[in-house]
Structures are given as structure tokens and as C-alpha cells.
Image (cartoon, rainbow, N blue to C red):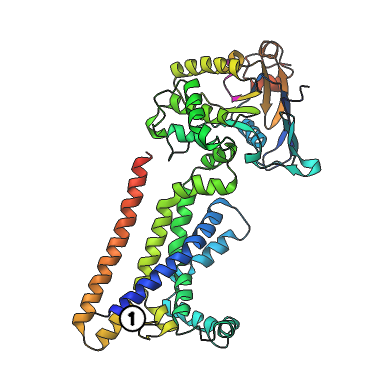
Amino acid sequence: MDWTALALSLRLGAATVLILLPLGIFLGRALAFHQFRGKGFAEALLALPLVLPPTVLGYYLLLAFGGNSPLGQAWQALVGQSLVFSFEGLLFASVIVNIPFAIQPMQRGFEAIPTEVREAAACSGLPPWRVLWMIDLPLAWPGIVTGLVLAFAHTLGEFGVVLMVGGSIPGETRTIAVAIYDRVQAFDNRAAGIMSALLLVLSFAALGISYVLSRRIGRRHG
Amino acid sequence: MDERGLSVQLRQAGPIPLAVDFSCAQGELLALIGPSGSGKTTTLRAIAGVYRVRDGRVSCGGAVWLDSKHGLDLPPHRRRVGFVFQNYALFPHMTALRNVVAALGHRPASERGPRARELLATVHLQGYEERWPAELSGGQQQRVAVARALAREPAVLLLDEPFSAVDRRTRRKLHAELAELRQSVSIPIVLVTHDIEEAAGLADRMCVIDRGETLQTGRPAELLAAPASSRVAAALDLPDADD
């Protein structure tokens, strides 16, 4: 059992979710409540990581983060180390890969709020930030939690993009999914089996929690 | 006209054509009547500021809320409207009491609870404070919506077909309660309805609207006796639709 890889995966999942929470609420809400030119294009762009092969996505991220790219060079100048094959690079990649997993449920959560309820809030004298706090977030929270749970579970299991952008540096970029692959390559099936079972249980528990929460809120409000 | 009443002028060619002109004095109940899809609800939503019109002027309680010519268009939370939506639009995750408290943001926090209880008592909902909207009947939900609309101390009360989703008996009761409510508040009240008997029974004046255009305003008896045109008669579905 590679505890370092598990700890790194959990750290990566938590950091990804922490970044995607405000980003998902902002983008999900904007897509749910506003009509604008090119909305379909924006939605398609955000959904791309769902259908792109992880190696393709990983390849483009590798190019975007590499030492020859403006982003890679800016990062190198700012932090003094390379963005590829680092935890920070992995985190950037993880956020991008998980955008659709987080945003789509959040968007559906906001879309499910009846327009009139939000209008009634504004007519009750609530300024937009209070409508967000008192109406949007409490009513859309099953969608928000589902988005975060899916993103977290998906981060634990992501393999192709991690390998392309991060490689397999112990304690830095070797996640539990990569560690499983390494153990299988080394014919250590016992360790691979334990880690696979753990990932299976974690993923099932995460999804179970999101379904139970969604159902509970639905019952309470009739 | 009464400076503190409601004055509405709305103009736009599309997407929903509007040519609306009417006013409603303090303490007056004006019924906006017309067939389905005639622009009644859109007019109310434009007054509240949740629908934006291209061109218009709306003033109420001595304040100008919309003046397109001078680039003024206050957002809904800055217009003192009490809006009762057709399906009530209660906040489903808040109890009846919290629904009313939510609209009391202009009051000090310590006063909100007692004031909300007072308002719920006014609409005969004592003992229902901790109920969720899903646990209330249609008539009770409508009363919570009225209490919430009044909580804001509005300069105008806008009622969008508030009696359409309840049975006849409840409707009769709610009609009586609206008449009772008018004794205690002296603000303009605009009632949207397509029910001519309801409009004639409750309103001081009726304003007929058809395809986004206000056609005629007058006392119910006068208007029903002498519709200004065949279009008015048709909009009111009067038997004699001749000029």
C-alpha cells in the first residue's frame, strides 16, 4: 500500500475541489441564469474534457504548461520551478479536467430554481448578493455538493492526464491511480488489489453521499 | 394625478409589444383585465423591474423607478413593490415565518420576527408560522405571499391572478380578505385577472388590455355598459361586441 500516493491523491482532490467551488458557483450560475451570444459554444468548450481522450488533453496541457509556452515561462519566472512534473502543474491540470464534472451539476442545480422564486426574492428587497446567499445557494446546494463529490472522486481516479503532465514522481506527482499502474507493472498484485479496492470504496461512498443528500433535500421541500 | 400614486407608461415594439398607459391612485384598486397572453403579467413584471422594457416611465410613491429618457432604471430590489405571484413563488426552503422575515431586511434584526408574526396574524395564519410552504394549502400559501409582499412596506401592491389556483370557496374567502386588507393599507393595488366578474366585484376601476395595448380605463359599471370599441368588448368577452 502506497500511503504517500494516497495522501497525495487526497491532497490533490481537496485542492481541486477548493478551487472548483467558487469557480463552479460563478460559472454554473452565469450559465443557468444568463442568455448570451455564444453560450452553446462556451458550454461545449467547458464540456470538452468529458469526451477528449485523457492523453489528448494531457498532451495539450503539457504543451501549455511546458517551458516553451508563455504560461510555463511566466510560472518559471514567478516561482522558480517548472510547472510540468510538479504538484502545482498537476493541480492546474486537475482543475481543468474536472471543470465539467463540477460545473454541470451545479448549473443544473441553479437551473432548477424557479425564475419566479428568484424574482420574488428581488421584489422582497433582497440585493443580488443576498439572493445568492439566501436563495440560490440553499436551493442549488444538492447540485453544488454533487459537483464537488464527482470532481473529488474523479480526481482520485484520473490517470492519463496525471501521467502526461505530472509523470510519476513519488510524493510530488505519483497519485494512487498511477501507483496502482506501477504496482501492476512490478507484478505486485496484492498492493494493486488493496489500492484498487480502496479507490472503489471511496468512489462508491462519495457517490452514495451525493445521492442521499439530493434525495433528502427533495423530500423536505416537497 | 395623485403624485404618490402609481403612474405607468410602457412602450416597445418587441419582443413583447407594449403600449401601456394607466395610473392608480393611493388606496385605489385597479384591475388590469384582458385575455390570456394580452401582456397583463408582463406589465406587472415591468412595474416591479424584473422585466426590462425598451422605453417607458414608471413612478410610484413620489419616486421615479423607470425613466428611459433619462437613463434611469432601478433594479427590482430598489423599487418598493409588494408582488404576489400567480403561483405565489414562496421560498420553498423557508418556513412561513422565514418567508416573511426575508422581506423585512429594511428593519432592525430584533424587530423582524415580531413584525413577521404580526403580518401572518393579519392574514389569519396564526399558528402556521413554522410550516413549510409544501405543507400549506393553496389559500394558505397565497396568504403567506400577501404577508411577504406587505412586509416590505411597499408603495404599490401588485397581484398577479392571485385567486386563480384556489377553489371557489377559498376564492370567495380570499376576496373578502382582500376587501378587508384594503381598509388597513392605503396604497395603490393593481390586480391582474382575466375574470371579469372578479374584476367588477373587487376593483374601483378596470383597465382593459389586449395584445400589450391598454384600450380603455373606467369604472366597472361604466366600462361594461359602454365599451369604447368592439376590441374592448371582444377583450372583455361581452356578448354585444359591436361598436
Residue B169, image x, y percentages: 44, 16
Local crowd size for mark 1, using a 10 Å CA cut-off: few (<14), some (14–19), many (≥20):
many
Name the foreground residue: B167 vs A216.
A216
Q: In which quarter of the image is the C terminus of chain B?
A: top right
A129 part of magenta stretch: no
Range of magenta residues: B192-197
* Residue found at the very far front of the displayed protein: B110
SS at circle 1: helix
Residue A53, image x, y percentages: 42, 76
In the rendered structure, the answer to whether residue A203 lies left or right of residue B196 reads: left
Name the foreground residue: B221 vs A162.
A162
Q: Mark 1 points at which residue?
A: A178
Q: Quadrant of the N terminus of chain B?
A: top right
Please, is residue A205 above or below residue A164 in the view?
above
Q: Which residue is drawn at 56% across and 30% down?
A: B151
In the rendered structure, the answer to whether residue A34 lies left or right of residue A25 reads: right
Please, is residue A33 above or below residue A205 in the view?
above
Which chain contains the residue that carries disc 1?
Answer: A
In the rendered structure, the answer to whether residue B113 lies left or right of residue B1 reads: left
Q: Which residue is drawn at 74% across and 17% down?
A: B228
